[in-house]
Amino acid sequence: MKQGKGIPNSKFDRIVGIATTKPVPASLRHKHIYVGETAGFHSLGYAGCIFSGKGKGIFQPGAITQADISIINDGDILILDDSGKFDFVWEVGSPHNAFFLTGKCNVSCLMCPQPPCDFENLAYGEARHILKLLQGREIADICLTGGEPTLAKDKFIEFLAHCVAQHPESYISVLTNGQTLADLDFVTRIAEIATPNVIFCVSLHGDNPGLHDAIVNKLGSFEKTEAGIYNLARKGVKIEIRHVITKMNYKRLPQMARHIYNYIPFCNHYAFMAMELHGEAVKNADRIMVNPVQYKGNLADAALLLERACLPVSLYNIPLCMSDERIRHLARQSISTWKNFFPQECCSCSQKSLCCGFFSTSEKISMEDIKPFH
């Protein structure tokens, strides 16, 4: 997530609040984080403060000073901690906001950009706090992610129910590896609250058990994931299949498309995704890293097979100049705004406004393969 940094004025517990540069009534200040140049009586009573100037301020136990406040917009929801860091957990105007429900996971994907960590109870508590702060806002998209967000089954169902009740018009996507969904009773409980606006985005990285299990680094995962997909379909919950392309599976992209057509053609959407070379993906780069240019032919064959079968398919995270011209119409602007990056070579490209660009978080970008359109 997008972050900022400054100098903490003291030790304090993590603070969650809505950023404001304007005065807020005293009765509402406990929900807000004041953002301004300097401290004073005008900044008293807020949950926390962020200042661009120096000094510890007046009676400000949870303040960060010497920070770049130009990156903060009124209405952003921030988390402050006493290291001086502040995280943007909800950005005004961004279509890529998400609730991080847990750092725990039940698989160990070789290309995971965010390695699992023991961060569950705090994450759920903060997520509930953020959801309360969003009450009354019109939210187009909500994403539930982790870790594996469905691991704490009861907490997950409770949180999903709150999202649906509070934002019935929002499109809610759940990013999951599908393992817990092999439990039909659990899926039945999900189906009782899931509306047509809720979709489960299930990761499936191979067309056979050996390949998928090797990529997620857990035996038996393929069987459980496919059982979860069938359970969701049986209960009428919407499904998207997400297939991350790596060196281990790119040669079998056409076989993956045929597997989809033969065994799971009932899903609402299918996405082929380029990797973000970050986290575990960096550690395992020799085994999994592959340039989109290397697989664009295989990807075109796979995507066109699904499209000709009238199955809705998209390409995520793949720049237009690195994809086969036959399938460029399937490319989406899929990279989160806070980590979306266009190198200098893209400045003159006539298609830049339509392209997803690159991950700023990726350790390596194939600059030599960037071919701007003119």
Image (cartoon, grey):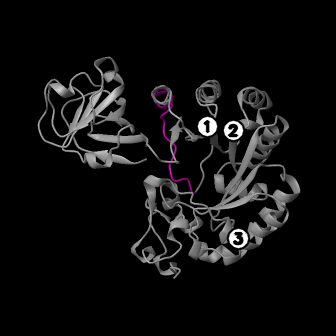
SS at badge 2: loop
Residue 292 place in picture, x, y as percent: 60, 72
Of label 2 and label 1, which has the lower sequence position? 1
Q: Which residue is mark 2?
A: 197
Q: Which mark is residue 153?
A: none
Disc 2 marks a residue whose amino acid type is Asn
Disc 3 marks a residue whose amino acid type is Leu
Q: Which residue is mark 1?
A: 170
Q: Residues within 10 Å of mark 2 (few under 14, many from 20)?
A: some
Of label 3 and label 1, which has the lower sequence position? 1
Query: What is the distance, in whole Å, between disc 2 and disc 1 at their CAs?
Result: 7 Å
Asked if the residue at tag 1 contacts the one at tag 2, i.e. Cβ–Cβ closer than 8 Å, the answer is: yes
Q: Which residue is mark 3?
A: 299
Residue 67, quarter of the rendered image: top left
Residue at image position (62%, 24%) is 158
Q: Which residues are magenta?
A: 111-126
Residue at image position (48%, 47%) is 94
333 up-or-down from 32: above or below: below
The question of residue 298 being in magenta is answered with no
Disc 1 marks a residue whose amino acid type is Ser
Query: What is the distance, in whole Å, between disc 3 and disc 1 at their CAs?
Result: 32 Å
